[in-house]
Image (cartoon, rainbow, N blue to C red):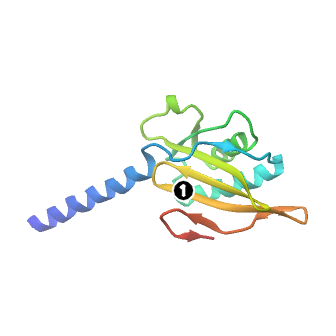
Amino acid sequence: MRSVILATVAALTLAGCQTANKSGGPLLISTAETVSLQPGEADIIAMDLAGMLEQHFAPGKTTFTLQKPASGVLGPVLEGKLRDAGYGVGVDPAQATGDAVEIAYLVDRYDQSYVVRVQAGQGYEVSRLYRNSDGNFMPASGFSLRNGEDVQ
């Protein structure tokens, strides 16, 4: 009986560590859009990212605090897509509650593509390439999870 109780306590402790790692701690990237996105491109990226975040953070139970740059079109579009998906979204990290998951993103040029990198909390980071091919803006790679598995 004692070993069952100890095993249960150990499992709950480890589960708590995993949960804390997803949401807390300082982010390693700061939000920036170093390239100018067109509104349609921002919409495609934001829909894509909101869908990816849905696979790892429960809508209706998760509140995000979104770092937004001083300029750029992706921040407001991403905020709207996250709200549409059922997330609470704050935009002032100074007013975030203790359980809010902070999101930062980076949009940059890489070769003939855009690279979009997102960090949500301390333990979740995803990146993806996007390309404008023959007038169609679309993903040019699968999602890549840092310290995790590739997700298509």
- Mark 1 = which residue? 125
- When the figure is inspected, residue 13 is found, relative to residue 151, above or below; the finding is above
Where's the N terminus, which quadrant? bottom left
Where's the C terminus, which quadrant? bottom right
Q: Residue 44, image x and y in percent?
A: 76, 55
Taking the spot 44% from the left edge, 52% from the top edge, the residue there is 22
Horizontal arrangement in the rendering, residue 127 relative to residue 21 (left or right)? right
Q: Which residue is situated farthest in the front direction here?
A: 111
Q: Which residue is situated farthest in the right direction here?
A: 134
Taking the spot 69% from the left edge, 41% from the top edge, the residue there is 75
> Which of 95 and 32 lies nearest the eye of the viewer?
32
Horizontal arrangement in the rendering, residue 103 relative to residue 21 (left or right)? right
Residue 73 location, quadrant: top right
Q: Residue 116, image x and y in percent?
A: 67, 55
> How many dots with numbers?
1
> Which of 88 and 27 lies nearest the eye of the viewer?
27
- When the figure is inspected, residue 42 is found, relative to residue 138, above or below; the finding is above
Circle 1 crowding by C-alpha within 10 Å: few under 14, some 14–19, many from 20? many
Label 1 secondary element: strand
Taking the spot 68% from the left edge, 47% from the top edge, the residue there is 81
Q: Which residue is situated farthest in the left direction here?
A: 2
- When the figure is inspected, residue 51 is found, relative to residue 134, above or below; the finding is above
Q: Residue 46, image x and y in percent?
A: 70, 51
The amino acid type found where label 1 is placed reads Glu
> Which of 78 and 129 lies nearest the eye of the viewer?
129
Taking the spot 43% from the left edge, 41% from the top edge, the residue there is 99
